[in-house]
Image (tube, helix red, strand yellow):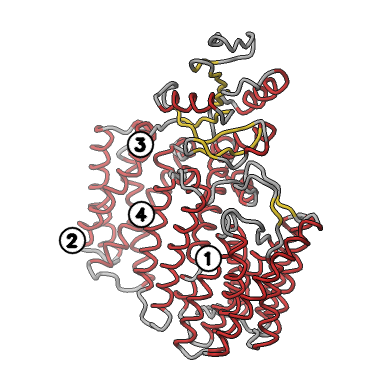
Amino acid sequence: MTVPLLGAGIAAAISLASTPFVRRLAVLGGMTDLPDARRVHSVPTPRGGGVAVAVGVAVAFALAGGAPSAPVLAGALLLLGTGIADDVLSLALPAKLSAQVLAALLAVAGGVRLDLPVTPDAVDAVLTVMWIVFITNALNLSDGLDGLAAGIGAIAFLWLAAAAVRAGDLTTAVPALVMAGALVGFLPYNINPASIFLGDSGSLVIGYATAVLPLEATARGTLTAPAAFLLTALPMTDTLLTITRRFVSRWLRTWAEIDFWRGVREGIRNVGRPDRRHIHHRLIDLGFPQRRAVPILYTVAAVTGGLAFLAARSTHWPIDLSALGLGLAAIGLVQALGIDELRLARSGAALPVLRRVIDRRGLVIGVDACLAAAAYTGALILTDRATGVATTLAAAVAMAGTAVLAFTILRVYDVAWRATGLTGLGLLLRACAAATVGGYVILRLVGLPVGGGPGLVFFAFILPAAAAMRLSYLLLAQAAESAVGPERALVCGSASGARRALARLRRRGLRNVQPVGLVELRPRWQGRRLGRLSVLGTLDGLDDILRQTGARHFVIADPAVRGDALRWARAVCRHRGVHVHRYVEKLVPFDGRVAIRLERPAVGR
């Protein structure tokens, strides 16, 4: 135990001592992160703190030993160089992604594997590369609040080291503790208000280490696969939600307006476009200051890391229950954080797509056939009548054909899907009964598995499934209509006028309008807070702020917004379809065709 603790102590001391020098070099070298609408910090801050972490790790390995394999070290050095270049030059996404793939290939060449039960081995190697790149990016994307990525990384490495020490695996414990020590030494400079950021030179290397070291521990029997996944559950969940919402929001919109495949292409392109909608950003938007939001996320990372420690030695860990629990947690997260892009039923995002789909009779017939086949397969399995894959499949296909024929003869497809009512449901009841009886007769004649029990179960399955499919449009439309929430609003100003405007908005000065952020003329105000709202940026970045927040109203509460600034704001809002309002003594619509009189309310249209 002495050697791992020695390495951790050396790494922490060197990282703590070298960070001020790295910060000074970052300022001299132009490695500065400037505030904008997507970032939370309000003043220019040097980045490149990952160099100090790397120095601490290198010295600890040199003095205490315990360095990982040469291919893994080579991959880490490659990402360190790529991160430094990005901190200085802001590399394009393809360049950074290529470096991550090459680093993952180096790790795989050194024997790192997911060890999934797949053949051939090349498939496992490809999946391992994808996993390493995914986790590397997940930690990189989590670097959005002061101390967040460094803290999450340190927590993951500490739990990994604890599991390795318990198993007597010093080969894993030493590098894990060294990484944790270096991050702990860096954190005093990185917690809010941060005087230096990790930058990509730090977040890429931390992500790479949290992907590779658990896999090496899994190969030695120190961890089980679920434990390795749980160590990175928080950044992994954030990244999956980010990819899903970016893809789904653009895909559904483009599919509804143009076509399916164009929507897929636009959705894939949108995945790589940064925004301000990560989990940590949503906590800030909900009113949590950084000093509260970061400890909340630390707690989540500590809990999932503790679960990884408990599952590290268990070969019978209930994977199904774990997956169910994480899935329910993700659903709860979507609801709690108000991620509208993934609340398809309540937001009505799927309605335009469903409206296009239901007008295609051939597609409706295909869905009915699939439902009937699945219903009869389930009926055979539940009643122990399934006698083999081939005969079960043949019986399911025959029943599906019979169901479509019965629906056609009884003119079920003549009833418009979106107008289904009690009459249509009565017709569907008769059609399902006819399909059940007709299918029983046909299957009996051709000698395929059939019986009274499977027939009754089939009828119990197909009727609610077909009815739910036909009622889905009406149910979604009703859910979207009942869930119409307040429209978002931005307030321009953060002084007394903005304070009064916020009070008026919260007293329903405009119906169904909810303020979500502030815009200022002065860059130095960015990041400040007023009435639980943050200053998201300046008027120059209004277009990006409107796009990222989805605001539908822009309330001008700063009397300095006049002349060119006012015309610019109105032009941007007109382009985005955003309503403009002015606050003097009350909120009024403002179209710019009348003079601004500060001594009395402006005249509306």
For label 4, the residue is 400
Q: Identify the image quadrant of residue 70.
A: bottom right
Label whose residue precedes the other's in the sequence (2 or 4): 4
Q: Comparing marks 3 and 4, which lies closer to the viewer?
A: 3
Label whose residue precedes the other's in the sequence (3 or 4): 4
The reply to whether dot 2 and dot 1 touch (C-beta < 8 Å) is no
Could you tell whether 12 is left or right of 337 in the image?
right
For label 2, the residue is 452
Q: Secondary structure at mark 4?
A: helix
Q: Amino acid at mark 3?
A: Ala
Q: Amino acid at mark 4?
A: Ala
Q: Residue at x 54, y 70 (%)?
A: 154
Q: Comparing marks 2 and 3, which lies closer to the viewer?
A: 3
The reply to whether dot 3 and dot 1 touch (C-beta < 8 Å) is no
Label whose residue precedes the other's in the sequence (2 or 1): 1
For label 1, the residue is 152
Q: Comparing marks 3 and 1, which lies closer to the viewer?
A: 1
Label whose residue precedes the other's in the sequence (2 or 3): 2
Say above or below: 538 vs 285. Answer: above
For label 3, the residue is 479
